[in-house]
Image (cartoon, helix red, strand yellow):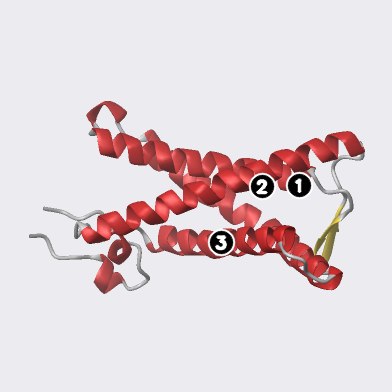
Amino acid sequence: MTVLVYSTQRVWLHWLSAAVIVWTLMSGFYVASADVPPRVGQWVAFLNVSLTTVYLPFFVWRLIIFVAHARHTSVRTLGFLEKLALLAHTLIYLVISLVLVTGVLMMDRPIDVFGLLEIAQPLSDPELISRFLTLHVWACVFLALLIVLHVGAVIVHELCEHRVLRRMSFCSVVRSEPPE
C-alpha cells in the first residue's frame, strides 16, 4: 500500500495558511467581542491587515496547486467520504477567497502593510464598504466553522490511525512511511 505524501511546498503553505488564518480569525473575533482598549484594537487591525496582505500571494499559490491537483482527480472514482473531503476542502478555499477579497473591499482607508507599503483603498462608497464589511464578518464566521470541522476530521483520522498529521509534517522521514 502506498501512502500519499504531501510535498514540502504543500506542507509549508498549509502551515503558513493555518498560522495566518487562525491568528487573524481569533484576534479579530476577540477584538470584535471583547472590551479592548482602542490602541489594542488598532494594533490588531494593523497587524491583521498587514499579515493578510502579505499572505495573499501565498494563498494564490496554494490555490493554484489545489486546483491543479483537483483537476487531475476523477470525481467519479472517489468514494463518498473522499467526495465529502474534496467538497470540504473546496469550500474552505472558496470561503478563504471570499474572506480575503471582502477584507480588501471593506477597507475604509489605505492598506498599510507593516509601514513599508501603502495600497490605496479600492472603494470609496461608504454604503458599499459597509456591505463588504458585513459580508466579510459572516464569511469569517463560516470559515471558523469550516476550520473547526477540518480539525475535527483530522482528529477522527488520527483516531482511526490514518496518519494525516504525520503526512503533513515537516520531517520528510516521518512523511514518507514505508509501504505495508
Expressed as whole percent of the image width and height from the top left, the position of residue 84 reads 34, 37
Spatial CA distance of label 1 from label 2 is 6 Å
Q: In this view, does 94 lie to the left or right of 157?
A: right
Mark 2 residue type = Leu
Expressed as whole percent of the image width and height from the top left, the position of residue 36 reads 78, 69
Marks 1 & 2, CB-CB < 8 Å contact: yes
Q: Mark 1 points at which residue?
A: 104
Q: Mark 2 points at which residue?
A: 100
Q: Residue at x 51, y 51 (%)?
A: 62
Mark 1 residue type = Val
Spatial CA distance of label 1 from label 3 is 18 Å
Q: Label 1, secondary structure: give it.
A: helix
Q: Residues within 10 Å of mark 2 (few under 14, many from 20)?
A: many
The answer to which of 149 and 12 lies nearer the viewer is 149
Expressed as whole percent of the image width and height from the top left, the position of residue 70 reads 39, 38
Q: How crowded is mark 3: few (under 14 residues within 10 Å), some or many (20 or more)?
A: some
Spatial CA distance of label 3 from label 2 is 14 Å
Which disc is residue 145 wearing?
none
Q: In which quarter of the image is the C terminus?
A: bottom left
Quadrant of the rendered image containing residue 40: bottom right
Residue lying furthest left: 180
Q: Which of marks 3 and 2 is nearer the N terminus?
A: 3
Expressed as whole percent of the image width and height from the top left, the position of residue 111 reads 83, 56
Q: Label 2, secondary structure: give it.
A: helix
The answer to which of 19 and 3 lies nearer the viewer is 19
